[in-house]
Image: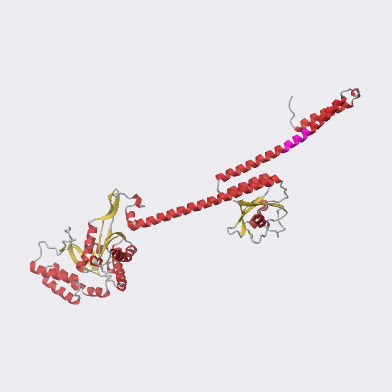
Amino acid sequence: MSEPNTNEDLFSKEEKIVKKANLILKDEKFAQNPLLVEYQSLLESYRKLLNQDKKLIKIGDGLQNKVKKAKNEIENLNEISRQISMSLDFDIVFGSIFEHIKSSYGFEGCCLTLVSQDKSRCKNEKFISTTIFDSIVDSYIGTTYSLKTNTGLIAQCIVNNEVGIYQDRNIFEEIDTNHAIKSAFLMPISIAGEVIGAFSLIHHTNISLKGEEKESLKKFANHISVVIKNSKIYEDSEKARIKQLEEFNLNLTLINKSLQKFVPKDFIQFLNKEHITEVGLGDSVQQDMSILFSDIRSFTTISETMSPKDNFGFLNSYLKVTGPVIRKNKGFIDKYIGDAIMALFPESPMNAVDAGIEMLDEVHKLNVKRKEWGRIPIQIGIGIHTGAPMLGIIGEEKRFEFTVISDAVNLASRIEGLTKAYSASILISEDTLVALSNPSKYYYRMVDKVKVKGKNKPVIIYEILNGNSERIIELKLSTKTEFEDGVNLYLEEKFEESSIIFKGILKKDPKDTAVSLYLERAKYYSVHGVPENWEGAWKLDSK
């Protein structure tokens, strides 16, 4: 025999039993039965028990519904908790909370209002709804309310920290009477006991909430506060991470800039490397370029009159004005050698010559200041040669150095050294002159043909006159033709004739050292004769 399917089936059977028992009691043949009274008593007890069963079953059904509803609520809250743990995207979690509230309680819109940092006002930051409240969302998203004047239901909810339930009220604007909101439920949102905003729920019909439903909705509000807190923590963490990353990048940039002060980035680029960490021993490349050497005249004598500290101050004041000139003209400083500068110009020899001329101009400006400081003026000599040096890394495992190796470097250094002998500011090699794309831009003259130590082939050197005073430039240009005639006679071993010309030049310009040197050599060769296989080149035995 199968069990009844429902409570109604069970009570229907019991009711039939009671009905049958009543018929028995009314039957006359049982009227004199001594057990009738006891039977009536038992039947009455049965009726009471039956009524109690009905009540208990009804209570049980109610409890079952409550348990089922509580179970659904817990599942909803667990799902929201899971989403909170999985995502820090506030919009995603806030949308999920609204969907659960809509499915469980029927509300058709929810709004999140947050207090400003200065706590003077609040603003509707998030607003989600079904299509029925589209106009409400468009009208009030971003609306702000004053917390100081305590005007409006949302502001009151936040200021008073109280839950509010309203019927037929536009909680967003009380003066609005033409609206679709029939029910509204407002809850304050708190973090660590501080009210940070309000959570509003709206519906287009009248909804009544029971006590347990209000408490359940408060739990959703608590979840929102957790989301906001987590979002803020994440935002703060992200800001801290970004700040840390920015500080790291800044430090890295500063380190790279510092490294570039010691190792020019141009050098690293020549080796086809992106960063200094990529270079290694033996990395090298050959590159056509012009090499510039500069040196302060009589530096040793000047430095002897100064303390070590003053010496460094003096050198740095000089390098401070000359270094930028080199970079401006597309060159870079390979190294400082005491008071000397070695710079490389990979693009054009004209860059090197222009840099040399501007360096002279900067030294002139510096000398004006040095005169004001009561210091003696300084002079520099500049030598430039163009060739194809090797750039690369030398050293050992614990100590690397970028360097340039070639005869071109040595020759540039020797040419700079010759500026002292000829009292010239800038001397360049013939290779550099030939490589100039526009030599007519400069005033220059051929100075000498020399054999530097360790070299058999003579090198013709030229003096660049630009950068000198106008008086010196005009004087040397006025004697340039005579000087060249005298040099040609000298090379033809016509020393007496050349001497006459040189003497004539010295009457016009007694300080022309190059002319004086030629005159001395002509006199010497007139008396002693020239060496065997003489090529007209003056041999330099010193570096």
Magenta residues (range) = 52-62
Name the residue located 77 percent from the left edge and 35 percent from the top edge.
55
Is residue 283 shown to the viewer in this render? Answer: no
Left or right of 219 in this view: 332: left
Does residue 59 belong to the magenta stretch?
yes
Quadrant position of residue 451: bottom left
Chief secondary structure of the magenta span?
helix
Tell me: residue 19, above or below residue 174.
above
Q: Quadrant of the C terminus?
A: bottom left
Quadrant position of residue 23: top right
Q: Number of marks in the image?
A: 0
Name the residue located 46 percent from the left edge and 53 percent from the top edge.
244
Quadrant position of residue 13: top right
Tell me: residue 110, above or below residue 14.
below
Q: In which quarter of the image is the N terminus?
A: top right
Name the residue located 48 percent from the left edge and 51 percent from the top edge.
241
Check the image and name the residue furthest to the bottom: 507
Tell me: residue 130, above or below residue 540.
above
Q: Position of residue 413 (x, y in %)?
A: 23, 61
Name the residue located 18 percent from the left edge and 64 percent from the top edge.
449
Does residue 229 belong to the magenta stretch?
no
Q: Position of residue 379 (x, y in %)?
A: 26, 69
Left or right of 134 in this view: 289: left
Q: Position of residue 516 (x, y in %)?
A: 16, 71
Question: Looking at the image, what colour scheme do you see?
Answer: secondary structure
Left or right of 45 in this view: 509: left
Is residue 12 shown to the viewer in this render? Answer: yes
> In this orientation, which residue lies closer to the viewer: 523 or 236?
236
Q: Where is residue 321 in the image (x, y as percent from the top left)?
A: 32, 66
